Amino acid sequence: MRLLVVGTSHRLAPVEVRERVALDGEGEAALAHRLGDSGEAVCLSTCNRTELYLAAADTGTAGDRATEALADLGRISRADLEPYLYRLEQESAATHLFRVAAGLDSLVPGEGEIQGQVRSAYERGAVGPLLDRLFRQALHTGKRVRTETAIGESPASVASAAAALAAQVFGDLSGRRIVVIGAGKVGELAARNLVSRGAQLSFVANRTVDRASSLADRFGGEALPLDRVDEELAAADIVVSSTAARDLVLDRGQIERALEGRKGRPLLLVDLAVPRDIDPAAKDLQGCFLYDIDDLQSVVEETLTGRREEAIRAEEIVAGEGERFNAWLASLESVPAIASLRERAEAIRRGELAKAAPRLVGLSERERHAVESVTNQIVNKLLHQPIMRLKEAGLGDEDDRGAPQGRLEG
Amino acid sequence: MAELLVWPALLAYGEAAVAYAGNARNPGGLGRLATWGVRLGWLAQTALLIVQAADAGGFPWNTWAGSLNLFVWLVVSAYLIWGCSARYRLLGLGVMPLAAALLAVSYAAGGTDDSSGAAWGDVVLVLHIALVLVSFAGFTVAGGLAALELWQERVLKSHPAGLLRQRVPSLLALDRLTVTTVAVSMAALSAGIVPGLARLPDRGLDVLIAGTVVLWALGASILYLRVRAGRRELAATLALGGVAAVIVLQLGLLFAHVA
């Protein structure tokens, strides 16, 4: 059995092509079982890639079938699809999957969602010994990269940077109260990130209360008109503002009043609007942390640089895991030769003992046992070096593999 | 025997201090080395204290150098409560060089010898020294936490692009820990002053007793400012003053008060 991957991703194909060969969970399972009828198959499909992992005796035929399947799926001719496809075999295919699972092949390096997508694909696939080992090791590699490097820790968007900043100020966000000013998409994204970390959306303030209600309802908060936002500021921990107003929505005086009586509890103000909604002079107030869109964007750029630096360490982990998989793959190939060598040696030993049996008649049970043990040890010692050579040859170049076996068995 | 244990403790604390410095420059594997240095050093010093106590047949830390030895152990013990987590490694950068240096001073001054000390029966003295040293250690660690809190506050105010790259505890976590540590230190100091008062008729009032009272007042002010008045930054700044007070008191011990 040999390993093969045929697929396309954001690195080669535009979204117009990727969307045509994309599959949902059921489609993944159906295609994997169809392609796995003569071997093993796993289909991994996300918004950035569709890949078919196959284990087959004849990778040429299996690859052709996979390409045909993708062309059928996208209703594209094979010739039109092939420029967007890659085909990798054996250790290259394994290392590719390890990079994918580690998030190193993602649009945003280190994004964590891919790990779950790889797991789902594996669970839906038609797996046998080869793909089972490959996917388990890929998931292990992804986990190692996330725990041993900081690649997935830093935020990759302005909204997630705002949530990370809130965590830097408050720690656990459970029960922290958010007030969102403006009911647009930007504010919603920031609120979603904060709520996912345990914070609680208290109010959405907007010029039109209807729009505020629709956002507030989705997160279990209340809507209020913009001119009443003052009343709720004192109880808020985090304020996210993203209106289209031309003038300031919150001035320094309003914030100063909100800070009174907080007993040292900080107030985080996140201004995502352009022009800005919150008076920049508020940043000098004690206990108040004000961030505007530029501050957050520079944080995101810096953390993406950090992710790229961490990716170098992650690549080392992937390379190590790739070598380990390669060694396992090679050892699989030498197993039949080792087994046959052992069988042959054991047969010779037993034959020679049978020949010598008439001369061993007078031996006691204990002496007979000693003879068995000594002959076994001799065989093992004689086989030790040839077996080691076979294993080493299995780890070497493919072209070398036949040589030691021939030399030993010749 | 004590001689055999002091070197591993010193080496491990020194290694932790160097590894913390390296980790601050380039976060990564050195942080783990530092944590292991703290753990192993603490184990060696704990063994050292046990051997000292067994050999002395009494309370062996009633000298200045001996009390410094016990003080270092208490500081590292307090640090170990949180210090093993990655987010508190910057605190280790402050604590471990101090611990290594003070243990070296204690060793040089004979504080790690197998000398005989005050009889265990002198409960008042033993309680007084132990509780006051616990409070000194607490104020030292609280000072370190307050320094980290004030630094974190400055970073969050100044908006550097890399502010999320440094793994540090959240501002409120540092605030809570500083106040809790000061509260525990105050309880120990108050309890330690009471047996000290029992000895007052024999020893009389000295500058160090006055200094200890000042430290108590400082601790009370920190708690009032933070808990009642909500002045988080001022309370943290005063907690830094607590470390200065402990240093003055420790130096004062060298020249007066304890044998």
Image (spheres, rainbow, N blue to C red):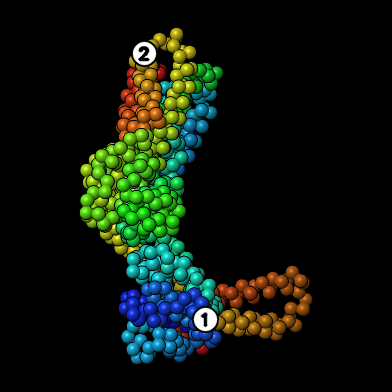
Q: Is residue A74 above or below residue A372?
A: below
Which of A339 and A102 lies nearest the eye of the viewer? Answer: A102
* Apparent side of residue B22 relative to residue B68 in the rendered image (left or right): left
Query: Is residue A402 in view?
Result: yes
The structure residue drawn at horizontal position 63% and vertical position 74%, both measured from the top left corner, is A376
Query: Circles 1 and 2: CB distance less than 8 Å?
Result: no
Which chain does the numbered disc 1 sit on?
Answer: A
Which x, y percent locates residue A190? 35, 56
Provide residue A320's location: percent of width, then percent of height.
41, 67
- Under circle 1, the secondary element is helix
Q: CA distance from mark 1 to mark 2?
A: 87 Å
* The image quarter in which residue B231 lies: top left
Identify the secondary structure beneath mark 2: loop
User: Are there few (<14), some (14-19), or many (20+) residues within 10 Å of tag 2?
Assistant: few
Q: Quadrant of residue A66?
A: bottom left
* Type of the residue with mark 2: Asp
- Which is more foreground, mark 1 or mark 2? 1
Which residue is nearer to you in this view: B192 or A391? B192
Q: Quadrant of residue A338?
A: bottom right
Q: What's the chain of the residue with tag 2?
A: B
Q: Is residue A123 left or right of residue A164?
A: right
Residue that numbered label 1 is attached to: A30
Toward the top, the furthest residue is B201
Q: Which mark is residue B206?
A: 2
